[in-house]
Image: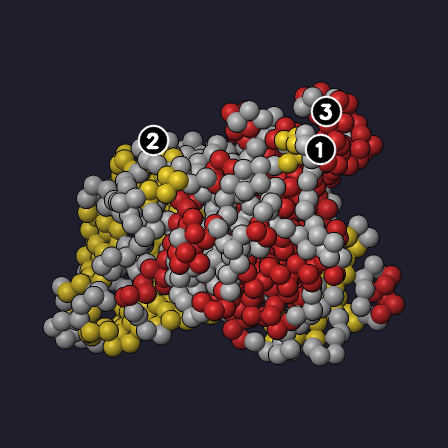
Amino acid sequence: MWTVPEETFNSEKQHHKETIFTIGNGYLSTRGAFEEGYPGDSRATFIHGVFDDVPLVFTELANAPDWLPIQVYLNGERFSLASGTVESFERQLDLRTGKLTRTIRWCSPTGDKATLRFERFASLHDEHLLCIRCRVTPEFDGDLEIRASLNGNMDNEGFNHWRWVEQGERDGAYYLHNRTRATGIDVVLAMRLIYTQAAASFEYWDAQNVPTLRVAFAAKDGETISIDKFVGIATSRDTEDPLRMATEHVLAVQSWDSAFEANQQAWEREWERCDIEIEGDEEAQLAIRFNMFQLLIAAPRHDNRVNIGAKTLSGFGYRGHSFWDTEIFMLPLFIYTAPEIARNLLDYRYQRLPGARQKAQGNGFEGAQFPWESADTGEEVTPTWVPHYADRTKLIRIWTGDIEIHISADVAYAAHLYWKVTGDEAWFVEKGAELIFDTAKFWASRAEWDQEFERYEFNDVIGPDEYHDHVDNNFYTNRMAKWNLQTALDVLKWLKEHAPVKADELIQRLELSPERLQTWQDVLTGIYLSVRSNGLIEQFEGYFQRRDVDLASLEPRDISAQVLFGIEGCNETQILKQPDVLMLQYLLRENFTDEQLRVNYDYYTPRTDHTFGSSLGPSIQAIMACEVGKPDDAYEHFIRAVRADLRDVRGNASDGIHGASAGGTWQAVVFGFGGLRVGSQGWSTHPRLPKHWKRLSFRFMHRGQLEVVEITNPVLSYKLQGQHRDRDEFRTRGLEV
């Protein structure tokens, strides 16, 4: 199962489908809009790092000049799905190669018929190369005209980020050069056409900001006319001369076949190290590959100055800003399958320590306080006010940028996980340790001493469960702060032993005096954590006193609990957007007993708004259901997660892919159903397969070694590196059966 299909076109679902059929290569992504256009489409190409200023939300990824446009004219009538008659329609995305294909049989308003086939891909082999093939098979004799353009008149839902600079021809390539209005980033696209049939005429139309190539052919009934459009693309972030780079890449193409073969080979290598195989569940098989594909096309392979936004590069949602979604939900896929990509994403955070330090200082704290929303500079870009979802004439105050502080520990956790799994000591010594030390400094300075109860607290915060704001002692926040402080002390001890010169340098530069280290110890020891005698954890102080609501009694519904009760009304209940406590227990699994997991799972699960709350929750809920021995519940949550975008479960997939959910589904399969655990002594698997899955196979990297795990149901057997091994052999490698 490698193909995402669409058998009919429904204009009411076009924005959702544009998201689903997004293609990309880690440098950019392009939504699945039609080459010829369609009324009301939401066409967009987003390039990593190409941000520009915008009112209210500070900055956003600028919708780049459009490389797609191809207009087809049959005897002077322009092909469009909005006119004439669509006699057949089929579109499919090949996840194995990243190629999007669309085939239409169309009858023009005056009765001329033709079959049109469009194929396109963003080369994974050459991230600066984009390719489109258009084939037209007319059912008439007459004239056929194709116009291929580059369109610089693009905007972000009405806001224009671009100034035209120049356009022209160089060495047979026709280019367009634009520049962002505020940030001054240059983007150049250069195109050329290859066609085998003899053209009746060829023209270059020098329309400003829309350079166009017009090719006319003599159409004959049943004879296919094929034209290949190649586009080179480069920005001033890549080179001082983006025009030269874009032109060189497009001129280097020999043919469609050679370009596609190189792309296909690159994708084969990609899937070789990360593919998941599921037998017995075709929907799950296709869906998990789709979710992985969407992350793979957003992952920067050659740029460590960018992060993956919450909506990847697939839509206008969240303006391209990145959150904790990357470190906690998306990053594990790359840590375990593509460590070099994970390292790029962590480098992004390391390079933005100055912005995090500036935020901490501005709030009166020490160390590094990472922004809730981050973009180009690492400064806080969370909007303060946004229009109300139910009444656009009203504004809602957004507090996450002010008080959702757990992200600083999340970044530190990701850096530590990368080191633990990959064994990349060079990176950790040079960069990772500093991330952990500087975030520890923040937590120690942010902690508040309660003299009455003689404890340290973190008050007025928002935890991952954003249905509740301005709460005190959110358990997730407090416990991750404790982890961050303890880990910093442990890492410093390790660093003194294994890299003493670096340890001394960081001690001096970060002012890690004995007095400061003692403060860290005092704070982590004294942090308030509310746990009942039976192991039940209070999500935040006073949570148990809030109104309990029987969510099941509210079914069926098609809106979130927050919309149903209102922002303030929902805040007064125990309803969760996502369960903080279970998220924390997943991340710090070794700190909790099986019974503690069960008690909290049973309490918080019925109080969680699973379908309409956070898209981040279901995948982690699936893992925790596996942990407490409820595989049926686990599958229910998992299938909800993998359907998030393919079936538009929340009704907002038009805004872009739910990147965190996509990453979470990979974790649900590998750590939940596969039961993978990685420790200092090696790795093990504790499978909990859904009862209808016949076989699960997944791959991951462990300290530079590609491991292949195969699990068969109901009698479990394992196959590693293509060889069967008995139980004794597993034990010798630190594995458990």
Residue on which disc 2 sits: 182
Which label's residue is closer to the chain start, 1 or 3? 1
| Helix, strand or loop under label 2 | loop
**Residue 249: numbered disc:** none
| Helix, strand or loop under label 1 | loop
Q: Is residue 228 visible?
A: no
Q: In this view, does 111 lie above or below 734?
A: below
Rendered location of residue 362, percent (x, y): 51, 25
Q: Which of 481 and 23 is in front in this view?
A: 481
Which residue is painted at 75% across and 32% down in the image?
521
Rendered location of residue 132, percent (x, y): 36, 58
In terms of image quadrants, where is residue 156? top left
Judge left or right: residue 515 versus residue 447: right
Residue on which disc 3 sits: 516
Mark 1 or mark 3, whichever is nearer to me = 1
Q: Nearer the viewer, residue 689 or 86?
A: 689
In terms of image quadrants, where is residue 447? top right
Which label's residue is closer to the chain start, 3 or 2? 2
- Name the colour scheme: secondary structure
In terms of image quadrants, where is residue 452? top right
Residue on which disc 1 sits: 454
Rendered location of residue 672, percent (x, y): 65, 63
- Disc 1 marks which amino acid? Glu
| Helix, strand or loop under label 3 | helix
